[in-house]
């Protein structure tokens, strides 16, 4: 299956935006992580923005960066949102309240706890009525999201926005699911075209023996292992490096996505 | 689209374990909704609780997955010869060629709710919890569990788009099959009762104080239920059988309007239904029965009626079956797809249970009483939070 990448959005400490992130991932700029300022997410109407969760703002922020690069009208783009744990902030708050005697949850907190909260806010902000999916595959949520997004592009011949995100898990839930730092990435994928950042040929193979790919930069490798959305760094680094490369992303213990990259020269 | 046959299927709801008891409850118009007796919840509402989930636990190699949601999943897998049918498919295609696409909205969150209640004075979780979050509450837990139970090694994921979750699994499975990434897919969904949804819907003032009354003039909200349903999907060209029930079409859309209110004109829902009809190559008049989302909230039923009567006119029979099952949230898609399948196979249309006086402002042909007659094609609607819509069309292969 062949798709083109039309836009990339990125947000994580030391990787703020694709332009800056690409230079770091290509090794031309040093990786210098610093606290990430609260994302702009200026696309959200003021009311929605005020009520939105960190997850929503991170997801919408990278989604917008990727969509702007693609030059596509977001109303024409289907979406796939991939996250291991989704709205862990809202879930943490709800479970705390449910452990008290009066158990009074606010309606806003409740509707913000669903796994498709970010997907919903994005469609509201852009008035998009295309299909929208939210999914999880634990640590392999990015690979599962990429699989869903690429099959959607190829089977429906339509552009797809893939957004993968997981935020730092708040205490005490982080005892059960330690994710130390947030990471969000967005890719606009479309049927093959001459004008794109990179084209990808994807195939899915059964894993014969487990081999693990990793990043050479040990600090970035720690980021990759900390956060399921950061599993995308293998692909992003290959794109940043340029040239024809093959990346493999594991999907559960038995499958892997083999991605052959072919940079488009503009 | 090329039809996909549901070669095996199974369903557990408050009405019974397996499609037989569910079908019988539908025929006998026996609701499974009872006064809320879930844990220590004191809300004045009715629920569709599955009996017996408190009375057993998952053992041996499945012990780490043990939680209400996965117990319900396990119970579902044991019914209707489903495990045998999957084992045969596995033999036919190979374990790595069978995908697992599950839907749930809250996964095993009840386990985390219990853990928060059991924290010690320092605020730390009890030891039993932390290593099991991954296998119980994480959103992928259900997919992991089903894959482990069935010994499958194909692609897998959990779709979680609130109420539409286990309707959308059919769309994802169709794409994986068409792309040649698998030869068969296990689709399904499980959602189980928990404090989050009970108190959450209570906060939204959407819970009825009586068993829910879809389409009734005095309807006052929904009743929560729980369910597990699974189907084995295969290409109809491989397993075509006259009389088999197949997925003929599906449509997915979003409202792009509000997180918890449907679009007032239902433009997103219209899009999903039109997409499903287009994909199936059918016209509205080809649909013999519409299984409504029909949650029994004031707004849902009114907007859905506007949408359905706008597309299908005033003569296509419609009903909601939530008076039997309650709203099973992330499992509603598979529950109502399989109820639609039972209607097709057994030639009947369920009336809208608990609807005493049909809301006179509704324009669609709302069925109140059951009718016995053969039908060929059913459309099932599911609309969820985040404005996430999915419509499915099932039909009998000629």
Image: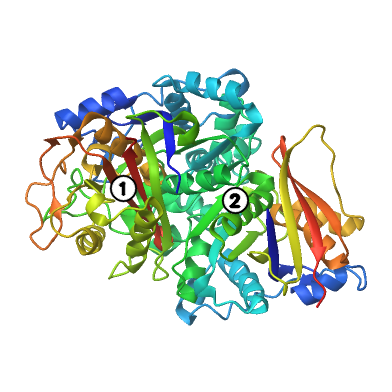
Q: Is residue B370 above or below residue A114?
A: above
> Can you tell which quarter of the image residue A230 is in?
bottom right
Packing grade of label 2 (10 A; few <14, some 14-19, many >=20) is many
Residue at image mark 2: A85
Chain of the residue displaying label 1: B
Q: Nearer the viewer, residue A13 or B328?
A: B328
Residue A67 seen in the figure: yes
Q: Secondary structure at mark 1?
A: strand
Q: Position of residue B288 (x, y in %)?
A: 21, 46
Q: Secondary structure at mark 2?
A: loop
Residue at image mark 1: B380
Q: Nearer the viewer, residue B98 or A178?
A: B98
> Can you tell which quarter of the image residue A63 is in?
bottom right
In which quadrant of the rendered image does the C terminus of chain A lie?
bottom right
Q: Position of residue A89 (x, y in %)?
A: 57, 58
Q: Nearer the viewer, mark 2 or mark 1?
A: 1
Q: Is residue B116 above or below residue B25?
A: below
Label 2 and label 1: CA atoms lie apart by 29 Å
């Amino acid at each position: 299956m062949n798709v083109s990448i039309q836009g990339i959005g990125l947000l994580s400490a030391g990787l703020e935006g694709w332009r800056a992130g690409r230079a770091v991932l290509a090794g031309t700029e040093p990786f210098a992580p610093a606290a990430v300022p609260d994302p702009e997410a200026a696309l959200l109407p003021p009311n929605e923005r005020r009520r939105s969760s960190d997850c929503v703002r991170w997801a919408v922020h990278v989604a917008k960066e990727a969509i702007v690069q693609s030059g596509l009208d977001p109303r024409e783009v289907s979406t796939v949102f991939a996250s291991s744990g989704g709205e862990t902030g809202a879930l943490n708050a709800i479970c705390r309240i449910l452990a008290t005697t009066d158990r009074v949850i606010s309606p806003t907190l409740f509707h913000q706890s669903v796994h498709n909260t970010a997907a919903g806010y994005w469609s509201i902000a852009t008035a998009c009525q295309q299909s929208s999916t939210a999914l999880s595959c634990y640590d392999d949520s990015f690979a599962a999201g990429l699989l869903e997004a690429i099959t959607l592009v190829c089977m429906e011949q339509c552009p797809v926005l893939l957004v993968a995100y997981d935020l730092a898990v708040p205490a005490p839930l982080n005892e059960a699911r330690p994710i130390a730092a947030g990471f969000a990435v967005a890719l606009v994928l479309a049927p093959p075209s001459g004008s794109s950042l990179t084209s990808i040929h994807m195939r899915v193979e059964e894993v014969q023996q487990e081999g693990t790919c990793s990043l050479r930069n040990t600090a970035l490798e720690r980021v990759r292992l900390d956060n399921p959305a950061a599993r995308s760094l293998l692909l992003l680094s290959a794109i940043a490096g340029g040239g024809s490369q093959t990346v493999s992303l594991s999907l559960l213990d038995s499958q892997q996505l083999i991605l052959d990259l072919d940079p488009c020269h503009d | 689209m090329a039809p996909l046959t549901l070669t095996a299927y199974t369903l557990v709801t408050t009405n019974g374990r397996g499609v037989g008891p569910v079908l019988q409850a539908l025929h006998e118009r026996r609701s499974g909704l009872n006064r809320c007796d879930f844990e220590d919840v004191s809300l004045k509402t009715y629920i569709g609780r599955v009996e017996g989930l408190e009375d057993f636990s998952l053992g041996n190699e499945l012990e780490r997955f043990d939680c209400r949601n996965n117990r319900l999943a396990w119970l579902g897998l044991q019914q209707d010869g489903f495990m045998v049918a999957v084992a045969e498919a596995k033999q036919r295609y190979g374990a790595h060629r069978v995908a697992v696409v599950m839907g749930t909205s809250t996964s095993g969150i009840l386990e985390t709710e219990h853990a928060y209640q059991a924290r010690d004075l320092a605020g730390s979780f009890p030891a039993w919890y932390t290593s099991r979050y991954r296998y119980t509450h994480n959103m992928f837990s259900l997919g992991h569990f089903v894959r482990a139970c069935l010994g499958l090694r194909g692609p897998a994921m959990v779709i979680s788009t609130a109420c539409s979750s286990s309707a959308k699994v059919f769309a994802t499975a169709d794409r994986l099959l068409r792309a040649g990434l698998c030869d068969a897919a296990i689709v399904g969904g499980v959602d189980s009762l928990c404090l989050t949804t009970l108190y959450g819907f209570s906060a939204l003032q959407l819970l009825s104080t009586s068993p829910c009354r879809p389409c009734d003039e005095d309807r006052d909200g929904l009743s929560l239920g729980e369910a597990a349903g699974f189907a084995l999907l295969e290409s109809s060209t491989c397993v075509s059988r006259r009389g088999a029930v197949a997925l003929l079409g599906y449509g997915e859309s979003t409202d792009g309007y509000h997180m918890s209110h449907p679009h007032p004109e239902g433009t997103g829902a219209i899009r999903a239904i039109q997409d499903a009809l287009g994909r199936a190559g059918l016209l509205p008049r080809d649909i013999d029965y519409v299984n409504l989302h029909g949650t029994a909230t004031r707004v849902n039923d009114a907007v859905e009626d506007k949408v359905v009567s706008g597309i299908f006119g005033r003569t296509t029979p419609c009903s909601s079956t939530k008076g039997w099952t309650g709203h099973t949230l992330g499992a509603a898609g598979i529950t109502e797809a399989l109820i639609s399948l039972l209607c097709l196979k057994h030639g009947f249309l369920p009336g809208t249970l608990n609807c005493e006086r049909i809301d006179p402002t509704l324009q669609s042909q709302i069925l109140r009483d059951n009718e016995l007659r053969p039908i060929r094609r059913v459309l099932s609607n599911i609309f969820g939070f985040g404005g996430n819509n999915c419509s499915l069309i099932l039909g009998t292969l000629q």
